[in-house]
Amino acid sequence: MRSPKNTATALESLHVPVQAKLAAAWTSFMFLYAYVDIIGFYKPGTIDDILAGVVFVFDITQVWAVTVLALMAVPILMVVLSAVLPARANRITNLVVASVQVPYATFNVVGGSWTYYYGLGVVLELIVLAVILRLAWTWPRTASPSTTATTADPVPVTVAN
């Protein structure tokens, strides 16, 4: 007769590649980035300003729209680049782009109203950027060929009977 198995076993923890973690972090960043702006439309007067052709202190022009699209394209493309770039280029790109995004993210809180709302959005974005920077900075290294065994033939192992 078998005894009942313990159903409270440890959870399986699979290895997730750094590239997948970075792509997930950039995806989270993009959701925050987009939804802070989308929910911000509910701030009284925002839609009226947009209909009048103004966002914050900027006139809504084609140059403004191209600039905003270019700025938003950077973290959007980082989702894909984090998944497809080779490790070395991936690490450097993530370190540079996340570092540049830090001051850009803090711009949302400068000089505006609804400081708590935009402040929370910035803090959450900065947390995700910190995760991205940490993942890229601590990217696991592989052993260099000079540190591995130098013999081409494995050492034979004999088993005593």
Image (cartoon, helix red, strand yellow):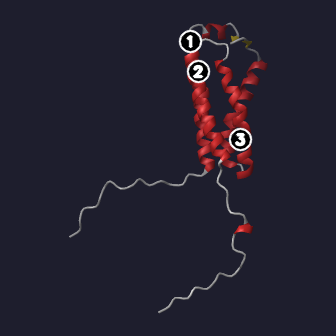
- Precedes in sequence: disc 1 or disc 2: 1
Is 16 located above or below residue 149 in the figure?
Answer: above
Q: Element type at marker 3?
A: helix
Residue type at mark 2: give it: Gly
Is 52 located above or below residue 5 in the figure?
Answer: above
Q: Which mark is residue 95?
A: 3
- Precedes in sequence: disc 1 or disc 3: 1
Please state the horizontal and vertical placement of residue 72, each as a whole percent of the image.
69, 29
Please state the horizontal and vertical placement of residue 135, each as a whole percent of the image.
63, 45
The residue tagged 1 is 43
Please state the horizontal and vertical placement of residue 13, each as a whole percent of the image.
47, 53
Residue type at mark 1: give it: Lys
Question: Is disc 2 surrounded by few (<14), some (14 to 19) or many (20+) residues within 10 Å?
Answer: some
Q: Residue 130's quadrant in the figure? A: top right
> Could you give the CA–CA distance between mark 3 and mark 2, rounded to whole angstroms?
24 Å
The residue tagged 2 is 119
Question: Is disc 1 surrounded by few (<14), some (14 to 19) or many (20+) residues within 10 Å?
Answer: few
Inspect this view and state whether residue 86 appears: no
Residue type at mark 3: give it: Leu
The residue under the point 66% across, 26% down is 105
Q: Element type at marker 1?
A: loop
